[in-house]
Amino acid sequence: MEYLDKIIITVVAEDSVLYESPYWGQHGVSFFLETYKNNTKINILVDVAQNSEALLYNMNLLNIDPSSIDALVITHCHYDHTQGIVDILKAVGKKDIPVIAHPDIFRLNFVVSPYLRHVGVRNADSKEKIEEQGGTLFLTSDPFPIVPGLITTGEVTRQTDFEEVGIPLKTFTEDHRIVEDKMKDDIAVIANLKDQGMIIITGCSHAGIVNILKQSIKITSLNKFKAIMGGFHLIEAPIERINKTVESLSHLEIDLISAGHCTGFQAQVALYDKFKNKFLPLHTGLKFIY
């Protein structure tokens, strides 16, 4: 795998904002990636959270021009990562903007407790409307190279025996049967930096953060992680799963973990207890420069 010369990652949307922060928080997550390679800069937005007004408001405060976005990556179907894709493409104002995701992203994805509710991509952000607004969909279950040194994980192989989706989600089979949704569309982004290791950007890690890291090692043949950031979806996980996750992560070479969104307070505490100053709670407005 090739490597980036430099990357700047800005948290444009997240559930939390710091004390006296000017940013708007929302349930969801979005990252703005500025990638540099051979004197070429490519900007990528990973997820759009669920409120485009708040996202664009934060972009303005962070001096991020939406028209500078060159591509979108959508980590999975859920509304708190996809609602407003069309609004953001409208703000970008360009044609043929790559929108990279898994082929299953537009399926019905729903919960039945405490009541029936669709939690996937909304009709306002349908495949047709994305294309009408200038998006070009790149839908694949394979790892997808975006720029040299930046690639998606593709569909993540489940290898651990303790990780799970984290929510009782349902979907339909082709013959219209109701089945448990395994969230095969959950992908992450891998940035490779020369002599520093990988940076992993996740949405919710429904595939399991340990599975995601194992997949990243397989794709890149690298073992060092400069940073892991995003949601780990341990918010409703039993303490046994949290402990197994933290223990598994502790056996890997990781310089920084910045977890938030759906990670949950109990898991954040466990991560801090194990990693100390190598752990940083994710929040809106954070900027990482590597």
Image (cartoon, rainbow, N blue to C red):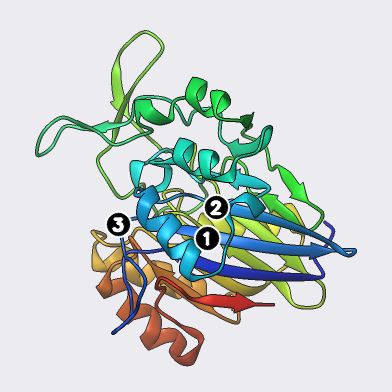
Classify mark 1: helix, strand or loop: strand
Q: Which mark is residue 31?
A: 1
From what the image shows, is residue 260 above or below residue 142? below
Q: Are marks 1 and 2 in contact (CB under 8 Å)?
A: yes
Q: Which callout, 2 or 3, points at the residue further toward the start of the chain? A: 3
Give the amino acid type for the residue marked by disc 2 in the picture.
Val
The percent coordinates of residue 45 (x first, y second) are: 57, 53
Residues under labels 1 and 3: Cα distance?
Answer: 14 Å
- Identity of the residue drawn at 65% across and 78% down: 289
Foreground pick, 242 / 8: 8
From what the image shows, is residue 209 above or below residue 185? below
- Considering every residue shown, the one lying at the far top of the view is 175
Give the amino acid type for the residue marked by disc 3 in the picture.
His
Question: Few, some or many C-alpha atoms within 10 Å of disc 1 (few <14, some 14-19, many ≥20)?
Answer: many
Which quadrant of the figure contains the C terminus?
A: bottom right
The percent coordinates of residue 177 (x first, y second) are: 30, 14
Give the amino acid type for the residue marked by disc 1 in the picture.
Phe
